Amino acid sequence: MRFQQLLHVRRLVSAGATTLMRRPITTTTITTTSRTALAATYPAFATTVRTMAGSGAPIPELTEITDNVQRGNYATLTDKDVAHFEQLLGKNFVLTEDLEGYNICFLKRIRGNSKLVLKPGSTAEVAAILKYCNERRLAVVPQGGNTGLVGGSVPICDEIVLSLARLNKVLSVDEVTGIAVVEAGCILENFDQRAREVGLTVPLDLGAKASCHIGGNVSTNAGGVRVVRYGNLHGSVLGVEAVLATGQVLDLMSNFKKDNTGYHMKHLFIGSEGTLGVVTKLSMLCPHSSRAVNVAFIGLNSFDDVLKTFVSAKRNLGEILSSCELIDERALNTALEQFKFLNSPISGFPFYMLIETSGSNGDHDEEKINQFIGDGMERGEIQDGTVTGDPGKVQEIWKIREMVPLGLIEKSFCFKYDISLPLRDFYNIVDVMRERCGPLATVVCGYGHLGDSNLHLNVSCEEFNDEIYKRVEPFVYEYTSKLKGSISAEHGIGFLKKDYLHYSKDPVAIGYMREMKKLLDPNSILNPYKVLN
Amino acid sequence: MRFQQLLHVRRLVSAGATTLMRRPITTTTITTTSRTALAATYPAFATTVRTMAGSGAPIPELTEITDNVQRGNYATLTDKDVAHFEQLLGKNFVLTEDLEGYNICFLKRIRGNSKLVLKPGSTAEVAAILKYCNERRLAVVPQGGNTGLVGGSVPICDEIVLSLARLNKVLSVDEVTGIAVVEAGCILENFDQRAREVGLTVPLDLGAKASCHIGGNVSTNAGGVRVVRYGNLHGSVLGVEAVLATGQVLDLMSNFKKDNTGYHMKHLFIGSEGTLGVVTKLSMLCPHSSRAVNVAFIGLNSFDDVLKTFVSAKRNLGEILSSCELIDERALNTALEQFKFLNSPISGFPFYMLIETSGSNGDHDEEKINQFIGDGMERGEIQDGTVTGDPGKVQEIWKIREMVPLGLIEKSFCFKYDISLPLRDFYNIVDVMRERCGPLATVVCGYGHLGDSNLHLNVSCEEFNDEIYKRVEPFVYEYTSKLKGSISAEHGIGFLKKDYLHYSKDPVAIGYMREMKKLLDPNSILNPYKVLN
């Protein structure tokens, strides 16, 4: 009977991407054009389109007050400074009113008190701004799409916000070599759209793609859902142009995959969160977009089965595996409760996996995925699921995954952790934390990029709760450090984790980070209060 | 008729990897065990096994004299120093005699005059050596397998040679995550062998694999023949342990794909050629080894057809393409003349390509490769060739590619250039250079990693010839710079190219490289006379 079921699965899959087993997918296909309507009906949906919409958490108090921040020894902005910037950029690009969206972080956890937002339109203008600020000792926070989760892209006190939003052009895309050159303020989704026009794809994809800037992605070394296939940005980014605090333009651009001429300094700007320089332009290696994309959404009974399924996916799907995501039942259920437009094709399992394949031959890929699912079912590791190659349905399933983090902040305060852990210990921390928080927390759940050993641990409660805070931190960092994991897999350090850096880096390394900072930003005007404490 | 030929091709390929068209492969399968015998018969073969064997060029004069090098202001080695090191390491690991193999570079172009070779057995010993040398102001050159091509791994004057050869252990290999931890002195082939025991493969492969050290590969950001599939080492290397000139150990190790905790300083040690620190340990992401590997060796009539075939390979082979190499007829013929044990399955074409696929399903891969070759033949772009999936024959074809660079130095002096160029201008420089050199040069040829826009331009002559030298340099760098290419795609800068760095990097960038050097090696004891002039 099991075998008949398998054959049934294969027939359905071969027939062209529909329901594997029990239930058909009933969600509406979400296309780009229908997004506006969806956002109107479901405000939270707009968070993937427009920053700062959606979170139901109240506007926070100023972080300088709540976190007792000692303002650095910087100059205070004067009218003369504003007049200087107006002359430099034109009045339209010097904002002094309605700055809330620039001052408050995506999670509504951090709120700065900046009085000035500058919107330069060229690298030269960025350079002129920084040169002036450096001479005047005015602190500056570079800001992209402001979708970061560690308070790295908002002011903490009264830093000037340097928005990269106008540097938004895709400058070139070479369809033969796959190399694209893009300005830092280009929205990730727009960049990907342009790459797709010539048969390429940006190797980075994440839930915030409709808002986040590629320059911000690079500055935070963003990970996302395809690292398992395309690796991290240190491999994909071929060149960077960065403006230093002094206003010097550091041209580390390259339109080639290989360039071994001197020290590979561009990597200092990948993941340093705007504290060493402002990325203004970059070149990126974009793989060919795949002719066939399939997504399987499967239910499993235990984390042990999840691990076995991951190993099987690596073996059976090999070079076409492009994503391997985990969602636990509490994370999924919270998203389904908050966003009624989502429909999960399966329910009732403690664990779910979203497995994506991307390949150049649809028939081959279907055969591989059928084999993988059939084997998993036969061994009793995969319980139920759906597989689809229909682009609309693929997008619907991805939407479930993308809405999971938003579900947790929709009407709650959420303590978010983003850790790398050995796979064998990957999920334990979620159970441990649930035990520690007890009924104080409304949801304690885990999801994330299993294929990269990267867990997003979330603890939700009605509003910020100091008792929960103390139960969670620094315990989560100590736990991670004992397993030699990373206390920040992909979100970065920003403001929120700067006191915990030592859990993942030793004093010698931190000492040299400080020296790098001194060397590249001697007056420490760039993104103060972040990364290093 | 053309169609019949195509069908014939497909049948042959499906039958299991044999000759596509005219001639069968007749070379003997070269296995690891037969290497010693081959090396005895054909001395040049041993260059892939043992450094310094093979090249027919005479022992050069001391570089300090030929290149008029001004010795740096370093201390001179004393008996007391030697006694100190003997106490530290034991007498067996302090060498003062028969140092030629450590003093002369692989190409026999550079010859240093070191009087001391140290062979530490642990990171702590490396640290103790450097601390002592830094305090005494003794200059040090770190040395791996000494297979570099720009004089980066040999002394220029009397620097102490710090050999990493004893730090040769593979410390761990995780077959689930694919992450391996290895000491710097491990030979690449040994590392790969260990990875293969658990179904993984090291993502780096190059001709010198039987001699080169993984630490040297990382220190030079080595490229090799699989960059088109697995990307560069900045993506694959997850962590690095480096000893600084001061003797401080900088622990930037990570056993995870994702770790965004602070500045990503490990990249400063990837490609800085031992001038900023000595890499002693690293972790690397190793992909699963492929169940099916196929190699096609094809002949083409023009470089235009080569480019079209590359584009077709990317489209048709997609995710299974693992190598795309070019060899021109002069490069191939020189290798065939020098090494009679090589047999090319085809001949008579101006261009040859070696295209490799690696995948998880042999049937699928054969179908893709048949489609690719069939299409190329039908369009008249591919003229003739062989395709094979037999491991022995795959190795034989690779051996042809690997022996090409050795053929050019077997009985000649060879000016070697390693440049990144836009694909549309990729091969022009070879014709231009042939014209410039005229009959002075015996062979002017090009081969390399077409898939990475990386050309190896070679100009051979009987012995070093100043007239050729002047015709080639700086012309080749100026030409590359005008096309915004890289004057060193993968070989690095070392000693030989340090005066040309400005052709690929601007003064601001070079200025900050100098600052990085001062910060990490304040007394400039590490690998002097290299990278920066």
Image (tube, coloured by chain):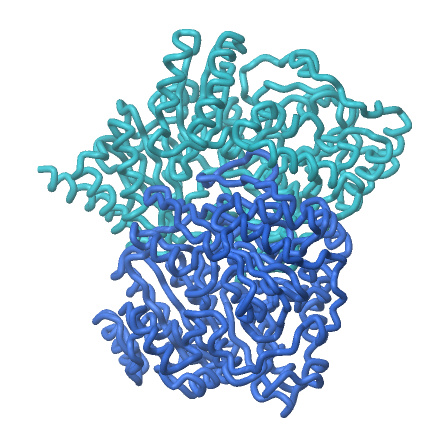
Chain colours: A blue, B cyan
Percent x, y of residue B36: 53, 30
The residue most toward the right is: B80
A527 sits to left or right of B33: right
A405 sits to left or right of A501: left
Of residues A528 and B376, the one nearer the viewer is: A528
Q: Quadrant location of residue A312?
A: bottom left
A60 sits to left or right of A473: left
Of residues A326 and B360, the one nearer the viewer is: A326
Q: In which quarter of the image is the N terminus of chain B?
A: top left
Q: Which residue is drawn at 48% across and 47% down?
A: A122
Percent x, y of residue A457: 58, 75
Q: Is residue B70 above or below residue A415?
A: above
Q: Quadrant location of residue A499?
A: bottom right
Of residues B445 and B135, the one nearer the viewer is: B135
The residue most toward the left is: B1
Q: In this view, does A482 lie above or below A251?
A: below
Q: Residue at x 69, y 46 (%)?
A: A135
Q: In which quarter of the image is the C terminus of chain B?
A: top right
B185 sits to left or right of B440: right
Q: In this view, does B250 lie above or below B257?
A: above
The residue most toward the bottom is: A439
Percent x, y of residue A268: 61, 48
Query: Is residue A332 visible to the viewer in this orientation of the structure?
Result: yes
